[in-house]
Amino acid sequence: MSEQGRVSGADPGSARRRALSLAGLSATSDSGMDRFARLVSRLLRVPMAFVSLFEEDREILPGLFGLPQPWADARALPPHGLWRSGEASGRPLVVADARTDERLRTAPAVAGLGAVAYAGMPLTDGDGVVLGALCAVDREPRAWSDGELSDLEDLARACSAELCLRILSAQSRSVQQVLETARAGADRARSDAQRLEREAQAGLDHAELLLRASEELAQTSGLEDVRRRLRDLFVGAGKPAYVGLLVADKDELHRVPDPDVEHAVEREVLTMPVTAAFPSTRALRERRPVFVPDREALVADYGPEALGVFDRMGFTTLLCLPLWGSRTVLGVLAICWAKKHEVGVTERATLTAASGYIAQAVERALYLDERISVARQLQEAMLTDLPRADPLEISALYEPAAVDDMIGGDWYDAYLLPPASSGEPGALMITVGDITGHDMHAATIMGQVRSMLRQATLDHPPYSPAAALTALDAACSVLPVEAAGTLVHARIAPADDGPGWTLTWSNAGHPPPLLRTPDGRVTVLTEHDILLHHTLGPLPRTEARRGLPPGSTLLLYTDGLVERRGHDMDASTARLVGLLARHGERPPAELLRHISAGLAQAAPEDDVVVLALRVP
């Protein structure tokens, strides 16, 4: 009997019967108790283990592992089968060899189970009443270690906790029946509280939507960016299944697809005439919100094409809001829910207010996109059309930066010089440069520098690159041309002393050109002077000369190709040298494609110019 039982005078048998009744265990398999038996067998490495609970005339085994027949099917042992001493004392019973132990050698289960070594830990309820034991049995004599007995004791405590939990659960169910009426009232109160909580949460969601719309859409850079930010703008319990952005263009409504996530509706319906029988086109035509509460309303007011799209996409409720710009309606915001959704007055007002922020972002994006388009057209117009320079082969590549709301200062130039005598191939001047800045001013300076350098070159026969650069320095120091940057200016001309070609170049602080000879070796042409800057004044520029073996490839480039934040420039240059070595025998245009692919950035931070020239 437990200490508490002795103090209170309670009958442990009566208390045990009540506890076992509440626990709901009998001489049948219980998954939880079987699990404890398996854990004992696995942890202590014994062939037999069981959970034994005491009834008046027997021990029931709701959990067992490894017991032979008939015990496994009966799930019961004779009264006090193995643990009579333990029951009396409430303490563990540990025996190395039951056959020689006075307490157990005559127990019927010793012979029936073939039990030799035995260890049993008491299982108790919350009041300390012994309900049974968690038992480990071996068929061979065994000296139980302290660790094994500690593990068995821990498992017995866990099993006792499980029994207590079942007893408490049963007691709780009894109390629940008594308090059923009170619970019903509490449920009603809870339902009211939840409704109020949902309304409060909806209010918070609406406020958060407006806050996020004002913040997220304030710095968008184009329609694609606006569409991307719309994806995560609408959250909360009433989150729509799809939010679409449609932009008006003359007599059509164009859907702006999500750049990162594919939506079936964007793949199926990208463009609609304004006269189409769709809720979105109606919102545009009538310049007012259009709400479709369910499929029946769509059938009543719209055409079969709209109904087909509605059904295929699985939409049930739809709200289309016109996007008002400063002068006209720019497009439509389509908000779709898969389940029927009640759009109350407050939510509609919130969504209408949010559409105002979206309209501002769309208007700004349309302006920026148009500006980018014009800038790109201007950039392309300012880049040189490469001359036909037979027998030389020449190709150039220009790639803009990812942040492309302005043109940049990277440029290339190539033009033929007058031939020295009739019938001989003329020399070719090539230039690659980078004017500091990424705006219209840089592009303007670039155009001026290119023209001035051409003039300086043609004014100084025999067309020395160094002389032309010196003249450019002198002009920039006098004229209001705030030129700053780097460039390589070079002449490729027939060799003076026989067949072949000669490269003469002057480098104003620019990344060094690369020369690949037909044997695959790449030389870095490191000779250079200081960079170009209008405040430095006229400087005596130098030039270098090198013969070009037949089949050689010359590569000029701007720093955007090899310089990027967080990367070593020397390592990037080494990669470029490797690409030129491997692919330099290819035609120049194909070579540039390999270089672009090999050094490409997902979002380039700077413009890139690359020019490749092959001598015959």
Image: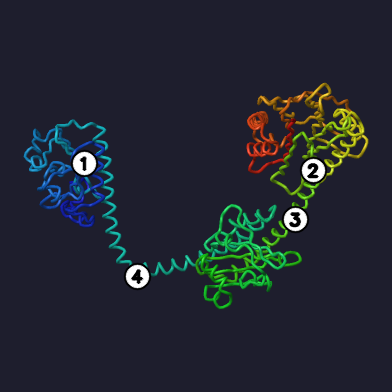
Q: Is residue 383 left or right of residue 263?
A: right
Rate crowding at label 2 as few (under 14), some (14 to 19) or many (20 or more) other CA atoms within 10 Å. few
Q: Residue furthest top?
A: 497
User: What residue do we see at 91% from left, 30% from top?
Assistant: 460
Q: Nearer the viewer, residue 4 or 332?
A: 332
* Marks 1 and 4 close (CB-CB < 8 Å): no
Q: Is residue 66 left or right of residue 305?
A: left
The x, y position of residue 220, in whole percent, is 68, 53
Q: Which residue bears the numbered disc 4?
A: 181
- Of the residues tagged 4 and 3, which is closer to the observer? 3
| Secondary structure of residue under mark 3 | helix
Q: Amino acid at mark 3?
A: Glu
Q: Nearer the viewer, residue 75 or 457?
A: 457
User: If you read the primary sequence from the N terminus, does the residue marked by circle 4 or circle 2 appear first?
Assistant: 4
Any part of residue 201 in sight: no
User: If you read the primary sequence from the N terminus, does the residue marked by circle 2 or circle 3 appear first?
Assistant: 3
Q: Which residue bears the numbered disc 3?
A: 370
Q: Nearer the viewer, residue 365 or 302?
A: 302
Quarter of the image with the C terminus in it: top right
Q: Which residue bears the numbered disc 1?
A: 121
| Secondary structure of residue under mark 2 | loop
Q: Spatial distance from mark 1 to mark 3, Cα to Cα?
A: 82 Å
Rate crowding at label 4 as few (under 14), some (14 to 19) or many (20 or more) other CA atoms within 10 Å. few
Q: Which residue bears the numbered disc 2?
A: 385
Any part of residue 18 in sight: yes
User: If you read the primary sequence from the N terminus, does the residue marked by circle 2 or circle 1 appear first?
Assistant: 1
| Secondary structure of residue under mark 4 | helix
The x, y position of residue 549, in whole percent, is 73, 25
Q: Amino acid at mark 1?
A: Met
